[in-house]
Amino acid sequence: MKILRYLRDAAVFAPCYVALDWASYVYPLGPFNITPWNPQPALAIVWMLLGGLRYLPAVLITIFVADVLIRHAPGGYEVSAVTALTLACGYAAIARLLRALLSPVRAVRSTRQLTVFSAVTIGGTAVVSAAFIAVLWMASFLAEASPVDAWLQFWVGDSVGTLVTAPLLLAAADAESRRDLFRLVQRAETLIQAATLAGTVWLVFVALGGDPAQHFYLLFPPLIWIALRGGTSGALIAVTIVQLGVIVAIHRDASTAFPVLELQAFVAALALTALYLGVTVDERQRAAASLRQTLRLAAAGEMAGAVAHEVNQPLTALANYGRSAQLLLARSNVAPHELSGVIEKMLSEGKRAGEVVRRLRDFFRTGTTQLESVPVDQVLASAQRIATQLGGSKHISIATGSEGELPPLFVDRLQIELILRNLISNAIEAMGEHPDEPAQICVMARRHDVEHVRLTVADNGPGVSAGVRDRLFEPLASGKASGMGLGLAVSRAIAEAHGGSLEAYASEHGEFHLVLPCSQKT
Protein backbone atom coordinates (compact mmCIF):
# COMPACT_ATOMS: atom_id res chain seq x y z
CA MET A 1 0.00 0.00 0.00
CA LYS A 2 2.83 2.42 0.82
CA ILE A 3 4.46 1.77 -2.57
CA LEU A 4 1.16 2.35 -4.40
CA ARG A 5 0.62 5.58 -2.46
CA TYR A 6 4.16 6.70 -3.25
CA LEU A 7 3.66 5.99 -6.97
CA ARG A 8 0.30 7.77 -6.94
CA ASP A 9 1.82 10.91 -5.38
CA ALA A 10 4.75 10.81 -7.79
CA ALA A 11 2.35 10.45 -10.73
CA VAL A 12 0.67 13.70 -9.64
CA PHE A 13 3.87 15.56 -8.82
CA ALA A 14 5.85 14.80 -11.98
CA PRO A 15 3.46 16.24 -14.62
CA CYS A 16 2.79 19.30 -12.44
CA TYR A 17 6.54 19.94 -12.11
CA VAL A 18 7.09 19.53 -15.86
CA ALA A 19 4.13 21.84 -16.62
CA LEU A 20 5.52 24.56 -14.34
CA ASP A 21 8.96 24.17 -15.91
CA TRP A 22 7.42 24.56 -19.39
CA ALA A 23 5.33 27.60 -18.36
CA SER A 24 8.39 29.35 -16.93
CA TYR A 25 10.71 28.57 -19.86
CA VAL A 26 11.23 32.19 -21.00
CA TYR A 27 14.31 34.23 -21.92
CA PRO A 28 16.86 31.44 -21.35
CA LEU A 29 20.47 32.45 -20.76
CA GLY A 30 23.38 30.62 -22.35
CA PRO A 31 23.48 27.21 -23.97
CA PHE A 32 22.15 25.55 -20.80
CA ASN A 33 18.97 27.70 -20.98
CA ILE A 34 18.96 29.27 -17.49
CA THR A 35 15.59 30.99 -17.03
CA PRO A 36 14.92 34.03 -14.78
CA TRP A 37 11.77 32.60 -13.19
CA ASN A 38 11.45 29.07 -11.79
CA PRO A 39 8.29 28.21 -9.79
CA GLN A 40 8.80 24.45 -10.06
CA PRO A 41 11.36 24.30 -7.17
CA ALA A 42 8.56 25.47 -4.87
CA LEU A 43 6.58 22.37 -5.77
CA ALA A 44 9.54 20.09 -5.03
CA ILE A 45 10.39 21.85 -1.76
CA VAL A 46 6.79 21.85 -0.48
CA TRP A 47 6.32 18.19 -1.46
CA MET A 48 9.39 17.12 0.52
CA LEU A 49 8.60 19.56 3.35
CA LEU A 50 5.18 17.97 3.88
CA GLY A 51 5.95 14.39 2.92
CA GLY A 52 9.56 13.95 3.97
CA LEU A 53 12.80 13.14 2.19
CA ARG A 54 11.50 9.78 0.99
CA TYR A 55 10.26 11.69 -2.07
CA LEU A 56 13.81 12.71 -3.01
CA PRO A 57 14.24 9.92 -5.64
CA ALA A 58 11.00 10.92 -7.38
CA VAL A 59 12.10 14.59 -7.37
CA LEU A 60 15.50 13.65 -8.81
CA ILE A 61 13.97 11.62 -11.67
CA THR A 62 11.39 14.34 -12.40
CA ILE A 63 14.03 17.09 -12.63
CA PHE A 64 16.07 14.94 -15.01
CA VAL A 65 13.03 14.18 -17.20
CA ALA A 66 11.98 17.85 -17.27
CA ASP A 67 15.47 18.87 -18.38
CA VAL A 68 15.34 16.37 -21.22
CA LEU A 69 11.81 17.29 -22.32
CA ILE A 70 12.01 21.08 -21.96
CA ARG A 71 15.70 21.88 -22.58
CA HIS A 72 16.60 18.73 -24.55
CA ALA A 73 19.60 17.98 -22.24
CA PRO A 74 22.02 20.45 -23.90
CA GLY A 75 24.96 19.11 -21.90
CA GLY A 76 24.17 15.48 -22.53
CA TYR A 77 22.52 12.97 -20.23
CA GLU A 78 25.54 12.75 -17.92
CA VAL A 79 25.61 16.48 -17.15
CA SER A 80 21.81 16.59 -16.86
CA ALA A 81 21.97 13.76 -14.33
CA VAL A 82 24.60 15.58 -12.24
CA THR A 83 22.69 18.89 -12.32
CA ALA A 84 19.46 17.08 -11.46
CA LEU A 85 21.17 15.45 -8.49
CA THR A 86 22.57 18.83 -7.40
CA LEU A 87 19.17 20.54 -7.58
CA ALA A 88 17.25 17.66 -5.97
CA CYS A 89 19.65 17.44 -3.03
CA GLY A 90 19.66 21.24 -2.65
CA TYR A 91 15.85 21.43 -2.63
CA ALA A 92 15.75 18.54 -0.16
CA ALA A 93 18.12 20.41 2.17
CA ILE A 94 15.89 23.51 2.01
CA ALA A 95 12.82 21.39 2.72
CA ARG A 96 14.55 19.66 5.63
CA LEU A 97 15.59 22.98 7.16
CA LEU A 98 12.10 24.45 6.77
CA ARG A 99 10.60 21.29 8.26
CA ALA A 100 12.79 21.71 11.34
CA LEU A 101 12.32 25.47 11.76
CA LEU A 102 8.59 25.64 11.01
CA SER A 103 7.74 22.57 13.12
CA PRO A 104 5.12 21.68 14.20
CA VAL A 105 3.26 24.00 11.84
CA ARG A 106 4.05 23.47 8.17
CA ALA A 107 2.49 26.74 7.00
CA VAL A 108 3.14 30.48 6.97
CA ARG A 109 0.79 31.96 9.57
CA SER A 110 2.92 34.42 11.52
CA THR A 111 5.54 37.07 10.84
CA ARG A 112 8.14 34.81 12.45
CA GLN A 113 7.26 31.89 10.20
CA LEU A 114 7.21 34.15 7.14
CA THR A 115 10.60 35.58 8.06
CA VAL A 116 12.06 32.10 8.58
CA PHE A 117 10.56 30.90 5.30
CA SER A 118 11.87 33.93 3.36
CA ALA A 119 15.38 33.74 4.87
CA VAL A 120 15.74 30.00 4.26
CA THR A 121 14.35 30.31 0.74
CA ILE A 122 16.56 33.22 -0.31
CA GLY A 123 19.69 31.85 1.35
CA GLY A 124 19.07 28.25 0.35
CA THR A 125 18.39 29.00 -3.32
CA ALA A 126 21.53 31.14 -3.42
CA VAL A 127 23.63 28.16 -2.32
CA VAL A 128 21.83 25.71 -4.61
CA SER A 129 22.19 28.08 -7.57
CA ALA A 130 25.90 28.48 -6.90
CA ALA A 131 26.34 24.69 -6.84
CA PHE A 132 24.36 24.32 -10.06
CA ILE A 133 26.37 27.00 -11.89
CA ALA A 134 29.62 25.49 -10.55
CA VAL A 135 28.74 22.17 -12.17
CA LEU A 136 28.06 23.89 -15.51
CA TRP A 137 31.22 25.97 -15.27
CA MET A 138 33.41 22.93 -14.52
CA ALA A 139 31.81 21.15 -17.47
CA SER A 140 32.52 24.21 -19.68
CA PHE A 141 28.86 24.63 -20.63
CA LEU A 142 28.41 28.34 -19.88
CA ALA A 143 30.16 29.38 -23.14
CA GLU A 144 30.32 33.17 -23.28
CA ALA A 145 27.95 33.71 -20.39
CA SER A 146 29.39 35.15 -17.20
CA PRO A 147 29.20 32.71 -14.26
CA VAL A 148 28.12 35.58 -12.00
CA ASP A 149 25.35 36.63 -14.40
CA ALA A 150 24.25 33.02 -14.78
CA TRP A 151 24.24 32.51 -11.00
CA LEU A 152 22.31 35.75 -10.42
CA GLN A 153 19.64 34.87 -12.98
CA PHE A 154 19.25 31.31 -11.70
CA TRP A 155 19.18 32.48 -8.07
CA VAL A 156 16.59 35.19 -8.72
CA GLY A 157 14.52 32.75 -10.72
CA ASP A 158 14.50 30.07 -8.03
CA SER A 159 14.09 32.41 -5.06
CA VAL A 160 11.28 34.49 -6.58
CA GLY A 161 9.50 31.43 -7.93
CA THR A 162 9.64 29.77 -4.51
CA LEU A 163 8.70 32.90 -2.54
CA VAL A 164 5.63 33.46 -4.71
CA THR A 165 4.48 29.87 -5.25
CA ALA A 166 5.37 27.95 -2.07
CA PRO A 167 3.05 29.87 0.35
CA LEU A 168 0.09 29.18 -1.94
CA LEU A 169 0.98 25.47 -2.12
CA LEU A 170 1.36 25.30 1.66
CA ALA A 171 -2.02 26.98 2.11
CA ALA A 172 -3.62 24.55 -0.34
CA ALA A 173 -2.19 21.61 1.63
CA ASP A 174 -3.39 22.95 5.01
CA ALA A 175 -7.04 22.25 5.85
CA GLU A 176 -7.57 25.44 7.87
CA SER A 177 -5.89 27.69 5.32
CA ARG A 178 -7.81 25.96 2.54
CA ARG A 179 -11.11 26.70 4.29
CA ASP A 180 -10.09 30.34 4.69
CA LEU A 181 -9.31 30.56 0.97
CA PHE A 182 -12.65 29.01 0.01
CA ARG A 183 -14.55 31.36 2.31
CA LEU A 184 -12.68 34.34 0.92
CA VAL A 185 -13.26 33.56 -2.76
CA GLN A 186 -17.00 33.26 -2.09
CA ARG A 187 -17.22 36.90 -0.95
CA ALA A 188 -18.44 39.47 -3.45
CA GLU A 189 -15.83 41.93 -2.21
CA THR A 190 -13.05 39.47 -3.07
CA LEU A 191 -14.35 39.10 -6.61
CA ILE A 192 -14.38 42.89 -7.01
CA GLN A 193 -10.85 43.11 -5.60
CA ALA A 194 -9.60 40.33 -7.90
CA ALA A 195 -11.21 41.98 -10.92
CA THR A 196 -9.64 45.32 -9.98
CA LEU A 197 -6.20 43.75 -9.63
CA ALA A 198 -6.56 41.80 -12.88
CA GLY A 199 -7.60 45.01 -14.64
CA THR A 200 -4.54 46.77 -13.23
CA VAL A 201 -2.31 43.94 -14.48
CA TRP A 202 -3.84 44.35 -17.96
CA LEU A 203 -3.26 48.10 -17.72
CA VAL A 204 0.42 47.64 -16.81
CA PHE A 205 1.27 44.99 -19.40
CA VAL A 206 -1.05 45.82 -22.30
CA ALA A 207 -2.87 49.15 -22.25
CA LEU A 208 -0.06 51.48 -21.24
CA GLY A 209 2.52 49.79 -23.49
CA GLY A 210 6.25 50.21 -23.23
CA ASP A 211 8.28 48.89 -20.33
CA PRO A 212 5.85 47.41 -17.75
CA ALA A 213 8.44 47.85 -15.00
CA GLN A 214 7.85 51.61 -15.23
CA HIS A 215 4.18 51.15 -14.29
CA PHE A 216 4.54 48.33 -11.77
CA TYR A 217 3.82 50.68 -8.87
CA LEU A 218 0.17 50.74 -9.98
CA LEU A 219 -0.20 47.18 -8.67
CA PHE A 220 0.57 48.10 -5.06
CA PRO A 221 -2.77 49.82 -4.11
CA PRO A 222 -5.11 46.97 -5.15
CA LEU A 223 -2.70 44.37 -3.77
CA ILE A 224 -2.50 46.15 -0.41
CA TRP A 225 -6.29 46.51 -0.42
CA ILE A 226 -6.77 42.76 -0.84
CA ALA A 227 -4.14 41.90 1.79
CA LEU A 228 -5.59 44.27 4.39
CA ARG A 229 -9.14 43.03 3.87
CA GLY A 230 -8.42 39.34 3.33
CA GLY A 231 -5.35 38.70 5.46
CA THR A 232 -2.93 35.99 4.38
CA SER A 233 -5.50 34.32 2.14
CA GLY A 234 -6.15 37.61 0.36
CA ALA A 235 -2.41 38.18 -0.06
CA LEU A 236 -1.98 34.73 -1.62
CA ILE A 237 -4.80 35.38 -4.08
CA ALA A 238 -3.33 38.77 -5.02
CA VAL A 239 0.20 37.45 -5.51
CA THR A 240 -1.12 34.59 -7.65
CA ILE A 241 -3.04 37.00 -9.89
CA VAL A 242 0.04 39.18 -10.39
CA GLN A 243 2.27 36.19 -11.11
CA LEU A 244 -0.22 34.74 -13.62
CA GLY A 245 -0.42 38.16 -15.26
CA VAL A 246 3.34 38.21 -15.72
CA ILE A 247 3.31 34.71 -17.23
CA VAL A 248 0.47 35.46 -19.65
CA ALA A 249 2.01 38.77 -20.69
CA ILE A 250 5.39 37.18 -21.42
CA HIS A 251 3.93 34.26 -23.37
CA ARG A 252 1.40 36.48 -25.14
CA ASP A 253 4.06 38.42 -27.01
CA ALA A 254 7.26 36.41 -27.14
CA SER A 255 8.78 38.95 -29.53
CA THR A 256 8.73 41.71 -26.92
CA ALA A 257 11.88 41.86 -24.84
CA PHE A 258 10.42 42.22 -21.37
CA PRO A 259 12.92 42.99 -18.59
CA VAL A 260 12.03 39.70 -16.90
CA LEU A 261 14.72 39.88 -14.22
CA GLU A 262 13.59 43.35 -13.21
CA LEU A 263 9.94 42.30 -13.31
CA GLN A 264 10.66 39.33 -11.08
CA ALA A 265 12.38 41.60 -8.57
CA PHE A 266 9.21 43.71 -8.51
CA VAL A 267 7.08 40.59 -8.11
CA ALA A 268 9.24 39.50 -5.17
CA ALA A 269 8.79 42.90 -3.54
CA LEU A 270 5.03 42.74 -4.16
CA ALA A 271 4.80 39.20 -2.80
CA LEU A 272 6.70 39.94 0.40
CA THR A 273 4.78 43.18 0.96
CA ALA A 274 1.43 41.46 0.51
CA LEU A 275 2.36 38.42 2.59
CA TYR A 276 3.72 40.47 5.50
CA LEU A 277 0.61 42.67 5.44
CA GLY A 278 -1.69 39.66 5.29
CA VAL A 279 0.10 37.78 8.05
CA THR A 280 0.12 40.91 10.24
CA VAL A 281 -3.62 41.36 9.72
CA ASP A 282 -4.25 37.72 10.67
CA GLU A 283 -2.05 38.00 13.75
CA ARG A 284 -3.91 41.11 14.84
CA GLN A 285 -7.26 39.39 14.37
CA ARG A 286 -6.10 36.36 16.36
CA ALA A 287 -4.81 38.65 19.11
CA ALA A 288 -8.12 40.52 19.19
CA ALA A 289 -10.07 37.25 19.37
CA SER A 290 -7.81 36.01 22.15
CA LEU A 291 -8.25 39.28 24.02
CA ARG A 292 -12.03 39.06 23.69
CA GLN A 293 -11.92 35.53 25.06
CA THR A 294 -9.68 36.67 27.92
CA LEU A 295 -12.01 39.55 28.74
CA ARG A 296 -15.04 37.27 28.65
CA LEU A 297 -13.41 34.75 30.97
CA ALA A 298 -12.21 37.55 33.22
CA ALA A 299 -15.73 38.96 33.32
CA ALA A 300 -17.10 35.52 34.15
CA GLY A 301 -14.51 35.16 36.89
CA GLU A 302 -15.29 38.55 38.37
CA MET A 303 -19.02 37.84 38.10
CA ALA A 304 -18.46 35.04 40.59
CA GLY A 305 -18.51 37.62 43.40
CA ALA A 306 -21.91 38.91 42.34
CA VAL A 307 -23.19 35.42 41.62
CA ALA A 308 -22.02 34.16 45.00
CA HIS A 309 -24.31 36.68 46.66
CA GLU A 310 -27.20 35.79 44.35
CA VAL A 311 -26.81 32.07 45.04
CA ASN A 312 -26.28 32.63 48.75
CA GLN A 313 -29.67 34.32 49.15
CA PRO A 314 -31.81 31.41 47.87
CA LEU A 315 -29.59 28.89 49.68
CA THR A 316 -30.09 30.77 52.94
CA ALA A 317 -33.80 30.91 52.29
CA LEU A 318 -33.83 27.18 51.54
CA ALA A 319 -32.14 26.47 54.86
CA ASN A 320 -34.67 28.65 56.71
CA TYR A 321 -37.63 27.02 54.97
CA GLY A 322 -36.14 23.61 55.73
CA ARG A 323 -35.99 24.43 59.45
CA SER A 324 -39.57 25.72 59.25
CA ALA A 325 -40.64 22.43 57.67
CA GLN A 326 -38.94 20.52 60.50
CA LEU A 327 -40.75 22.61 63.09
CA LEU A 328 -44.06 22.02 61.34
CA LEU A 329 -43.48 18.28 61.18
CA ALA A 330 -42.68 18.28 64.88
CA ARG A 331 -46.20 19.52 65.58
CA SER A 332 -48.82 16.83 65.90
CA ASN A 333 -51.60 18.85 64.34
CA VAL A 334 -49.73 20.34 61.32
CA ALA A 335 -52.07 21.27 58.47
CA PRO A 336 -51.15 19.85 55.04
CA HIS A 337 -51.52 23.24 53.37
CA GLU A 338 -48.98 24.78 55.75
CA LEU A 339 -46.34 22.18 54.90
CA SER A 340 -47.23 22.41 51.21
CA GLY A 341 -46.70 26.17 51.26
CA VAL A 342 -43.26 25.81 52.81
CA ILE A 343 -42.27 23.15 50.26
CA GLU A 344 -43.51 25.37 47.44
CA LYS A 345 -41.28 28.19 48.67
CA MET A 346 -38.32 25.80 48.91
CA LEU A 347 -38.87 24.74 45.29
CA SER A 348 -39.10 28.36 44.21
CA GLU A 349 -35.82 29.25 45.92
CA GLY A 350 -34.13 26.18 44.44
CA LYS A 351 -35.32 27.22 40.97
CA ARG A 352 -33.96 30.71 41.56
CA ALA A 353 -30.53 29.37 42.54
CA GLY A 354 -30.51 27.10 39.48
CA GLU A 355 -31.35 30.04 37.23
CA VAL A 356 -28.40 32.03 38.54
CA VAL A 357 -26.04 29.09 37.95
CA ARG A 358 -27.47 28.58 34.44
CA ARG A 359 -26.85 32.23 33.53
CA LEU A 360 -23.25 32.00 34.73
CA ARG A 361 -22.75 28.79 32.71
CA ASP A 362 -24.17 30.44 29.56
CA PHE A 363 -21.90 33.41 30.05
CA PHE A 364 -18.87 31.15 30.37
CA ARG A 365 -19.81 29.24 27.20
CA THR A 366 -21.02 31.95 24.82
CA GLY A 367 -20.90 35.30 26.60
CA THR A 368 -24.68 35.68 26.28
CA THR A 369 -26.59 38.09 28.51
CA GLN A 370 -30.12 38.05 29.90
CA LEU A 371 -31.61 41.50 29.54
CA GLU A 372 -34.46 42.45 31.84
CA SER A 373 -36.21 45.53 33.15
CA VAL A 374 -34.50 46.58 36.38
CA PRO A 375 -35.76 49.59 38.40
CA VAL A 376 -33.11 52.18 39.15
CA ASP A 377 -33.90 51.91 42.87
CA GLN A 378 -32.88 48.23 42.81
CA VAL A 379 -29.56 49.13 41.15
CA LEU A 380 -28.90 51.77 43.82
CA ALA A 381 -29.81 49.28 46.56
CA SER A 382 -27.31 46.82 45.02
CA ALA A 383 -24.65 49.53 45.17
CA GLN A 384 -25.39 50.00 48.87
CA ARG A 385 -25.11 46.26 49.52
CA ILE A 386 -21.88 45.89 47.51
CA ALA A 387 -20.23 48.79 49.33
CA THR A 388 -21.16 47.22 52.68
CA GLN A 389 -19.76 43.84 51.62
CA LEU A 390 -16.53 45.27 50.23
CA GLY A 391 -16.00 47.71 53.06
CA GLY A 392 -15.79 44.98 55.68
CA SER A 393 -14.54 46.47 58.91
CA LYS A 394 -13.75 49.80 57.25
CA HIS A 395 -16.12 52.65 57.96
CA ILE A 396 -17.44 53.69 54.57
CA SER A 397 -20.19 56.19 54.07
CA ILE A 398 -22.16 55.55 50.89
CA ALA A 399 -24.94 57.76 49.65
CA THR A 400 -27.31 56.96 46.78
CA GLY A 401 -29.97 58.99 45.09
CA SER A 402 -31.71 59.84 41.83
CA GLU A 403 -32.89 62.99 40.13
CA GLY A 404 -36.52 62.99 39.05
CA GLU A 405 -38.58 60.12 37.74
CA LEU A 406 -36.35 57.65 35.96
CA PRO A 407 -37.47 54.73 33.80
CA PRO A 408 -36.23 51.23 34.61
CA LEU A 409 -33.01 50.07 33.00
CA PHE A 410 -32.96 47.34 30.34
CA VAL A 411 -29.82 45.45 31.36
CA ASP A 412 -28.37 42.21 32.65
CA ARG A 413 -28.61 42.85 36.36
CA LEU A 414 -25.72 40.58 37.34
CA GLN A 415 -23.36 42.18 34.84
CA ILE A 416 -24.27 45.71 35.93
CA GLU A 417 -23.63 44.68 39.52
CA LEU A 418 -20.22 43.48 38.38
CA ILE A 419 -19.46 46.97 36.99
CA LEU A 420 -20.60 48.59 40.24
CA ARG A 421 -18.51 46.10 42.22
CA ASN A 422 -15.40 47.04 40.20
CA LEU A 423 -16.01 50.79 40.49
CA ILE A 424 -16.77 50.68 44.22
CA SER A 425 -13.82 48.37 44.90
CA ASN A 426 -11.49 50.76 43.06
CA ALA A 427 -12.93 53.69 45.01
CA ILE A 428 -12.38 51.94 48.34
CA GLU A 429 -8.79 51.08 47.42
CA ALA A 430 -8.12 54.64 46.23
CA MET A 431 -9.45 56.10 49.49
CA GLY A 432 -7.38 53.58 51.45
CA GLU A 433 -4.30 55.57 50.43
CA HIS A 434 -5.56 58.34 52.77
CA PRO A 435 -6.71 56.44 55.91
CA ASP A 436 -7.02 59.62 57.99
CA GLU A 437 -9.88 60.95 55.83
CA PRO A 438 -13.41 59.47 56.15
CA ALA A 439 -14.25 57.35 53.10
CA GLN A 440 -17.28 58.62 51.20
CA ILE A 441 -18.88 57.15 48.07
CA CYS A 442 -21.80 58.63 46.21
CA VAL A 443 -23.83 56.79 43.55
CA MET A 444 -26.22 59.13 41.77
CA ALA A 445 -28.67 58.30 38.95
CA ARG A 446 -29.94 60.92 36.53
CA ARG A 447 -31.33 61.18 33.03
CA HIS A 448 -28.65 61.09 30.32
CA ASP A 449 -30.90 61.37 27.25
CA VAL A 450 -34.21 60.01 26.02
CA GLU A 451 -32.99 56.42 25.85
CA HIS A 452 -30.32 56.28 28.57
CA VAL A 453 -29.75 56.81 32.30
CA ARG A 454 -26.37 57.88 33.69
CA LEU A 455 -25.03 56.46 36.94
CA THR A 456 -22.26 58.53 38.56
CA VAL A 457 -19.97 56.74 41.01
CA ALA A 458 -17.86 59.32 42.86
CA ASP A 459 -15.60 59.20 45.90
CA ASN A 460 -13.53 61.63 47.91
CA GLY A 461 -10.25 59.97 46.97
CA PRO A 462 -7.34 61.57 45.09
CA GLY A 463 -8.90 61.13 41.63
CA VAL A 464 -7.30 59.91 38.42
CA SER A 465 -4.54 61.89 36.73
CA ALA A 466 -4.81 62.78 33.05
CA GLY A 467 -1.90 60.50 32.10
CA VAL A 468 -3.41 57.50 33.86
CA ARG A 469 -6.91 58.29 32.57
CA ASP A 470 -5.77 57.89 28.95
CA ARG A 471 -4.85 54.23 29.48
CA LEU A 472 -7.15 53.40 32.39
CA PHE A 473 -9.40 51.08 30.36
CA GLU A 474 -6.61 49.32 28.47
CA PRO A 475 -6.44 45.59 29.22
CA LEU A 476 -3.56 44.55 31.50
CA ALA A 477 -2.91 48.20 32.47
CA SER A 478 -3.31 47.97 36.24
CA GLY A 479 -2.26 50.45 38.85
CA LYS A 480 -2.50 47.84 41.60
CA ALA A 481 0.41 45.71 42.74
CA SER A 482 -1.80 42.59 42.70
CA GLY A 483 -4.17 43.60 39.91
CA MET A 484 -4.49 42.03 36.48
CA GLY A 485 -5.69 45.22 34.81
CA LEU A 486 -8.89 43.60 33.51
CA GLY A 487 -11.57 44.98 35.84
CA LEU A 488 -12.19 48.31 34.12
CA ALA A 489 -11.57 46.84 30.66
CA VAL A 490 -14.21 44.19 31.34
CA SER A 491 -16.56 46.79 32.81
CA ARG A 492 -16.32 49.02 29.77
CA ALA A 493 -16.81 46.02 27.45
CA ILE A 494 -19.99 45.07 29.35
CA ALA A 495 -21.30 48.65 29.24
CA GLU A 496 -20.66 48.95 25.51
CA ALA A 497 -22.25 45.52 24.90
CA HIS A 498 -25.40 46.97 26.49
CA GLY A 499 -25.29 49.94 24.13
CA GLY A 500 -23.94 52.26 26.81
CA SER A 501 -20.56 53.56 27.91
CA LEU A 502 -18.18 53.87 30.85
CA GLU A 503 -15.85 56.84 31.19
CA ALA A 504 -13.52 58.27 33.83
CA TYR A 505 -14.49 61.89 34.43
CA ALA A 506 -11.84 64.57 34.86
CA SER A 507 -12.42 65.67 38.44
CA GLU A 508 -10.57 66.58 41.62
CA HIS A 509 -11.75 63.28 43.10
CA GLY A 510 -12.48 59.86 41.62
CA GLU A 511 -15.56 59.95 39.39
CA PHE A 512 -16.88 57.46 36.80
CA HIS A 513 -19.91 57.88 34.54
CA LEU A 514 -21.82 54.72 33.58
CA VAL A 515 -24.44 55.22 30.85
CA LEU A 516 -27.03 52.44 30.46
CA PRO A 517 -30.10 51.97 28.25
CA CYS A 518 -33.65 52.34 29.52
CA SER A 519 -36.29 49.67 29.00
CA GLN A 520 -38.46 52.11 27.06
CA LYS A 521 -38.37 55.63 25.65
CA THR A 522 -40.05 58.16 27.94
Image (cartoon, rainbow, N blue to C red):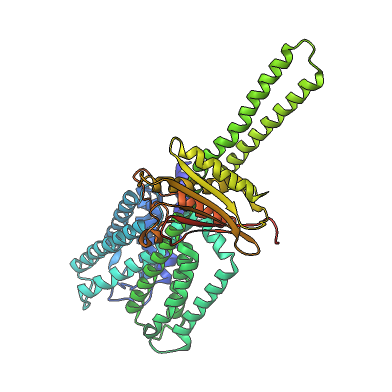
Residue 271 horizontal/vertical position (percent): 39, 69
Q: Which percent across, then down, holds residue 309? A: 56, 36
Residue 463 placement, left or right of 498 = left
Furthest-left residue in view? Answer: 138
Name the residue at 73% across, 24% down: 342
**Is 304 situated left or right of 373 in this image?**
left
225 w.r.t. 279: above or below: below
Image spot of residue 485 (x, y percent)? 41, 49
Closer to the camera, 158 or 472? Answer: 472
Quarter of image, res 190: bottom right
Q: Which is nearer the eye, 290 or 458? A: 458
Q: Is there any visible trace of residue 17 in the rendered image?
A: no
How many numbered circles are shown?
A: 0
Q: Nearer the viewer, residue 125 or 370?
A: 370
- Name the quadrant of the C terminus: bottom right
Give the percent coordinates (x, y) of residue 148. Answer: 20, 73
Q: Residue at x 56, y 60 (%)?
A: 183
